Image (tube, helix red, strand yellow):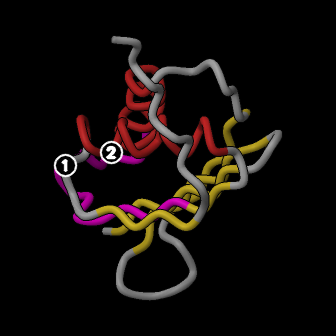
Amino acid sequence: MLLALDVGNTQTVVGLFDDDYPPRHTWRLTTVAERTADELALLLRDLLALVGLSPEQVDGAAVSSSVPVVTTTVARMVERWFPVPLVVAGALRPPRRRRP
């Protein structure tokens, strides 16, 4: 299944797709720029569990975002908690420069 996240300024819409449309499940979350990747993973894992699914059933992820800081958080979340191929449509926040 494909985990799709559409990150907007106020809401994030999450969809879970099998091979066709419409999505198998959809959810709406408040977009919170300060939310960590771990917190977001907890929310998504709980939503999956509510409908009897597990993260292991997700085999790909796609993110569309107009909020760069959240795009970066979602990418980190997928990398750590849903280690599947990820496609990102939107700008990632540039990495912080470390001082020497």
What residue is pinned by disc 2? 78
Among all residues in the image, which is located at the extreme right? Answer: 10
Residue 90's spot in the image, x, y percent? 60, 61
Question: Residue 51 or 54: which is nearer the viewer?
Answer: 54
Quadrant that contains the C terminus: top left
Is 60 a magenta residue?
A: yes
* Numbered tag placed on residue 25 in the rendering: none
In which quarter of the view is residue 5 placed?
A: bottom right
Among all residues in the image, which is located at the extreme front? Answer: 100
Q: Around disc 1, counting alpha carbons within 10 Å, would you say few (fewer than 14), some (14 to 19), or many (20 or more)?
A: some
Question: Residue 76 or 43: which is nearer the viewer?
Answer: 76
In this picture, which residue range is highlighted in magenta? 50-63
Q: Compared with residue 37, is residue 77 higher up or lower down, i.e. above or below?
A: below
N-terminal label among 1 and 2: 2
Residue 13's spot in the image, x, y percent? 66, 53
Is 19 placed left or right of 4 in the picture?
Answer: left
Quadrant that contains the N terminus: bottom left
Q: Compared with residue 41, is residue 13 higher up or lower down, i.e. above or below?
A: below
Q: Compared with residue 1, is residue 14 higher up or lower down, i.e. above or below?
A: above
Residue 15's spot in the image, x, y percent? 53, 61
What residue is pinned by disc 1? 83
Residue 70's spot in the image, x, y percent? 59, 38
Q: Secondary structure at mark 1?
A: loop
Q: Are marks 1 and 2 in contact (CB under 8 Å)?
A: yes
Q: Around disc 2, counting alpha carbons within 10 Å, would you say few (fewer than 14), some (14 to 19), or many (20 or more)?
A: many
Amino acid on which disc 1 is placed = Pro
Question: Residue 1 or 38: which is nearer the viewer?
Answer: 38
- For image coordinates 48% across by 21% down, the residue present is 36
